[in-house]
Image: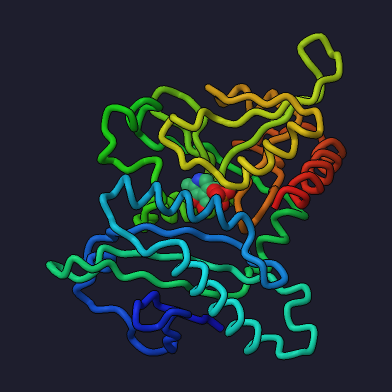
Amino acid sequence: MTVLVFLDPAFPAGRIVDAGTPAILATDQGVTRGDGIFESLLAVNGEPRKVGAHLARLAESADTMDLVIPGEDAWLAAMTTAVQTFVAAEAPAEDEFANTNVVLKLIVTRGPEGANKPTAWVQAAALSPALAEQRANGLDVILLDRGYDSTVSRRAPWLLLGAKTLSYAVNMAALRHAQKQGADDVIFTSGDGKVLEGPTSSVLLAHITDDDGAPVKRLITPNLDSGILPGTTQGALFAAAKEAGWELGYGPVEPADLLDADAVWLISSLRLLAPVKSIDGTEIGTPGVRARLTAELGALLATAL
Ligand code: PLP
């Protein structure tokens, strides 16, 4: 089931709307132009995870788009209503929040043409079981050229590359392209040959030995200013890994660095850490190292959320 809670000043806890009935005008610029922003996050046992980081990124995306959005209190109230309504409908047991994973989407569009009034709502829905499978089984990934160079976001901020906009049709097309080729997911590269991100995830790689074979614990992710979305999961994991003695590094990362890594993951709020088994048909690391590092970093991530 899907629960929708619209942010509406007349309803301090949010206005619940039946997801089966039309709730947005056909003239809304979110519909006519894909003009809007969103966040996806997980609520576990009733608690939205990394809520501060997601609201901060929503505010940054809004700023990039010159969009004025509702304040944090309105979002928090609508999220609470959405989670409670979802859980009450799906698991009306006594210990009602136990072991529930709810996917929350926070969405804002520019609203109807000429109205100067953004439309904002929270959606609550179940977590796809496919994501747990990805964590357990790993992913076969292909590299795809995004077509922009890694410095374009600085030269052309109107491309909105670091913002989480509603215009995800390109990202979904890349995923379909991968699936037609028998792959599970995609890592985008830039026109100048740098590793960027997945269509719905950040890229992370680990080294457990250095060039001389001496043991190290090093995590690397592409530069955050290369036109990618700064991942809240990558941010939380880096903070926890630093405490646990990992060295942290930011790109530039090139495809050869991925192939040379002991492990590579696609990470995001919903799928958490999904290990990459192969890139363009080349195996990354070994199954044993992949599984051990995924368990170690997964445990760190669990403490950080
Ligand atoms: N990069 C892109 C393009 C994404 O869509 C996402 C998440 O949806 C991420 C990275 C990972 O972000 P987060 O860890 O905040 O979920």
Residue 278's image quarter? top right
Q: Relative to the observer, which residue lies in front, 147 or 103?
A: 103
Q: Is residue 298 left or right of residue 126?
A: right
From the viewer's perspective, is residue 167 above or below residue 233?
Answer: below
- Residue 265: give x, y in percent of width and height: 67, 41
Q: Relative to the observer, which residue lies in front, 26 or 199?
A: 26
Residue drawn at 74 percent across, 39 percent down: 240
Q: Is residue 186 left or right of residue 276?
A: left
Q: Is residue 244 left or right of residue 18?
A: right
- Residue 194: give x, y in percent of width and height: 48, 26
Q: Relative to the observer, which residue lies in front, 169 or 281?
A: 169
The total of numbered circles placed on residues is 0
Residue 200 visible to an observer of this rendering: no
Q: Relative to the observer, which residue lies in front, 173 or 225?
A: 225
Residue drawn at 57 percent across, 75 percent down: 80
- Residue 137: give x, y in percent of width and height: 75, 53
* Residue lying furthest left: 114
- Residue 82: give x, y in percent of width and height: 54, 78
From the viewer's perspective, is residue 282 above or below residue 134?
Answer: above
Question: Which color scheme did the rendering employ for the protein?
Answer: rainbow
Residue drawn at 40 percent across, 52 percent down: 59
Residue 143 visible to an observer of this rendering: yes
From the viewer's perspective, is residue 43 above or below residue 177?
Answer: below
In the picture, the quarter occupied by the N terminus is bottom right
Residue drawn at 81 percent across, 20 percent down: 216
